[in-house]
């Protein structure tokens, strides 16, 4: 696939996810499923949503802004859209870490629908999500990916990710790469200082 032209990339933007666009969310999710990807599969079970009910799944994801479960931290859902408003991908910001997220998952997860990949939007969605994280007050974020996920690693390194370590995930059993990205010039706030004391069971495929 050829790179998107610079105007198309620059015209894409990050918007807050909204329930009224659930059919587009469903189409994006089904496109991932058709490509054999399990990014959303775990969410249905983990959030207790009837499998295949995409409207309810989106509602449950949006409700994580103010979670009532001890194993969930407050998090926000965003979509990357092109200049015409079509959904290209999704990003999550977890506004603080618990012990599980500190190990695997981090502050930020992102994915592109398969038809949007390989055109530079990976760099774009992470860059815009980091801007949103900074605007929301985070100063240093943890981003993790499977070590074998070369595209994601390239995106994280391109955003200034500094490799912390590469342990075997206690959640997936895979070797993962844990990167920190500073969002404020020279600032060290955030990160470990924001860890929740409880051990959550948060586990999903978006990193
Ligand atoms: C990770 C993801 C967002 C990257 O999207 P993308 O469209 O490939 O991103 P880009 O086109 O911006 O390319 C990013 C870089 O990865 C490289 N890349 C892409 N696919 C690659 C592959 N299979 N092997 C090696 N490098 C690859 C590109 O060449 C590019 O390199 P550059 O830094 O030199 O420019 C996308 O692959 C995805 O949604 N994957 C599934 C979900 C996921 O893994 N999310 C991240 C979890 S941590």
Image: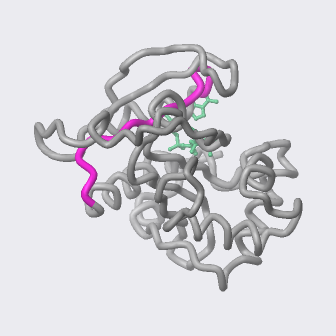
Residue 16 in the figure: left or right of residue 200: left
Q: Quadrant of residue 44?
A: bottom right
Q: Which residues are magenta?
A: 137-149
Residue 4 to residue 194: above or below: below
Image coordinates for residue 144, horizontal then vertical, percent: 49, 32
Is residue 126 or residue 174 the one in the foreground?
A: 174
Image coordinates for residue 169, horizontal then vertical, percent: 60, 21
Is residue 92 or residue 79 the one in the foreground?
A: 92
Residue 104 to residue 139: above or below: above
- At x 50%, y 75%, the residue is 83
- At x 53%, y 37%, the residue is 105
Image coordinates for residue 184, horizontal then vertical, percent: 17, 46
Assign ligand 1 to one image quadrant: top right
Residue 169 in the figure: left or right of residue 182: right
Q: Is residue 155 visible?
A: no
> Tag count in the figure?
0
Residue 151 to residue 50: above or below: above
- At x 61%, y 62%, the residue is 88
Is residue 107 or residue 84 the one in the foreground?
A: 107
């Amino acid at each position: 696939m050829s790179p998107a032209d610079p105007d198309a990339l620059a015209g894409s933007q990050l918007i807050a996810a909204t329930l009224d666009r659930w059919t587009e969310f469903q189409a994006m999710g089904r496109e991932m499923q058709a490509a054999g990807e399990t990014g959303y599969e775990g969410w249905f079970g983990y959030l207790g949503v009837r499998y295949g009910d995409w409207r309810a799944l989106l509602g449950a994801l949006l409700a994580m802004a103010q979670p009532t479960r001890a194993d969930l931290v407050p998090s926000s859902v965003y979509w990357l859209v092109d200049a015409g408003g079509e959904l290209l991908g999704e990003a999550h910001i977890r506004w603080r870490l618990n012990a599980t997220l500190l190990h695997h998952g981090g502050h930020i997860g992102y994915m592109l629908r398969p038809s949007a990949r390989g055109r530079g939007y990976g760099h774009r969605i992470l860059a815009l999500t980091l801007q949103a994280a900074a605007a929301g007050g985070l100063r240093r974020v943890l981003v993790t990916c499977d070590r074998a996920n070369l595209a994601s690693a390239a995106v994280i390194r391109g955003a200034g990710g500094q490799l912390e370590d590469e342990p075997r995930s206690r959640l997936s059993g895979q070797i993962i790469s844990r990167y920190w990205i500073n969002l404020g010039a020279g600032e060290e706030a955030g990160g470990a200082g924001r860890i929740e004391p409880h051990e959550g069971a948060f586990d999903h495929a978006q990193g």
